[in-house]
Structures are given as structure tokens and as C-alpha cells.
Image (spheres, helix red, strand yellow):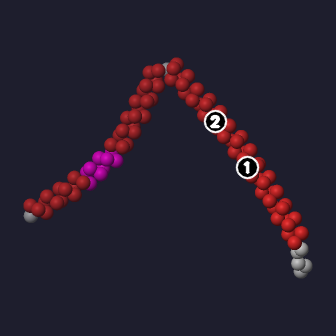
Amino acid sequence: MRDRTDSESDVDLQQLMNDVKVMLRDGQELLRVCATTVGRQARVGAESAERWAKERPYHALAVAFGVGLLFGMLSGSARGHRRSENYEDALEALQERSE
């Protein structure tokens, strides 16, 4: 095999650096475009939700109440499950003491 000269290595390294710079610029541009698109879609969605809530305030109130109720039930059942385990442990401890 032929050994590369320093100038060939420098050219290859320079070409690699140029390629990396181009890829980074393209990636940044793609990220900017995606962020802009997502931002626009979020804004449109928020405006649509706000318009719906203004047109149907009682429906919006019912949805908010339902979501809050569901969240409360889920978090309450998780805490209740832990409480029942603690209750069972405490009951066992009392029974062991009484024996």
C-alpha cells in the first residue's frame, strides 16, 4: 500500500471538517423549521381550545371538573392503597401484641 503524504491527510481532514460543518448547519436549519412548525401548531391548538371554551363555557367547566375528578380519584386510590397496606401491617402488629 502506498503511504499517504501529509498534504493528502490534510486535504482529507479539511474535507471532513467541511462536511461536518455543512451537516451541522443543515441540522440547525431543520431544527429551526421544526420548532417553528410545532410552535404554530401549538398556538393554533390553544386558540381553538380557547374559542371552544368561550363558545361552550358549561361544557368546558364540565370537562375541567371531570378531569379534576378523575385525577383526584386516581391519586386518591393510589394513596388509599398505601393506607390499606399500612392499616393491615398495623392490624397484624396489634394482633401479635395481644397474643
Local secondary structure at mark 1 = helix
Residue 58 percent across, percent down from the top left: 44, 21
Name the quarter where the N terminus is drawn: bottom right
Residue 27 on the magenta segment:
no
Instruction: Report which residue position mark 2 lands on.
Output: 39
Q: Which mark is residue 77?
A: none
Local secondary structure at mark 2 = helix
Tell me the crowding category of disc 2: few under 14, some 14 to 19, or many 20 or more residues within 10 angstroms, Cα based. few
Please tell me which residue is depicted at 81% across the width and 57% down the height of the picture.
19
Q: Going from the N terminus, do you reach mark 2 or mark 1 first? A: 1
Residue 47 percent across, percent down from the top left: 58, 26
Q: Amino acid at mark 2?
A: Gly
CA–CA distance in space, label 2 to label 1? 18 Å
Q: Magenta part of the protein: which range?
A: 77-85
Name the quarter where the C terminus is drawn: bottom left
Residue 83 on the magenta segment:
yes
Tell me the crowding category of disc 1: few under 14, some 14 to 19, or many 20 or more residues within 10 angstroms, Cα based. few
Query: What secondary structure is the stretch in magenta mostly built from?
Result: helix
The residue nearer to you, when weighing 92 against 41, is: 41
Q: Which mark is residue 27?
A: 1
Side (left or right) of 90 relative to 48: left
Q: Amino acid at mark 1?
A: Gly
Q: 17 above or below 7? A: above
Side (left or right) of 2 relative to 77: right
Please tell me which residue is depicted at 78% across the width and 54% down the height of the picture.
21
Side (left or right) of 94 relative to 86: left
Residue 92 percent across, percent down from the top left: 18, 59
Please tell me which residue is depicted at 25% across the width and 51% down the height of the picture.
84
The residue nearer to you, when weighing 20 against 89, is: 20
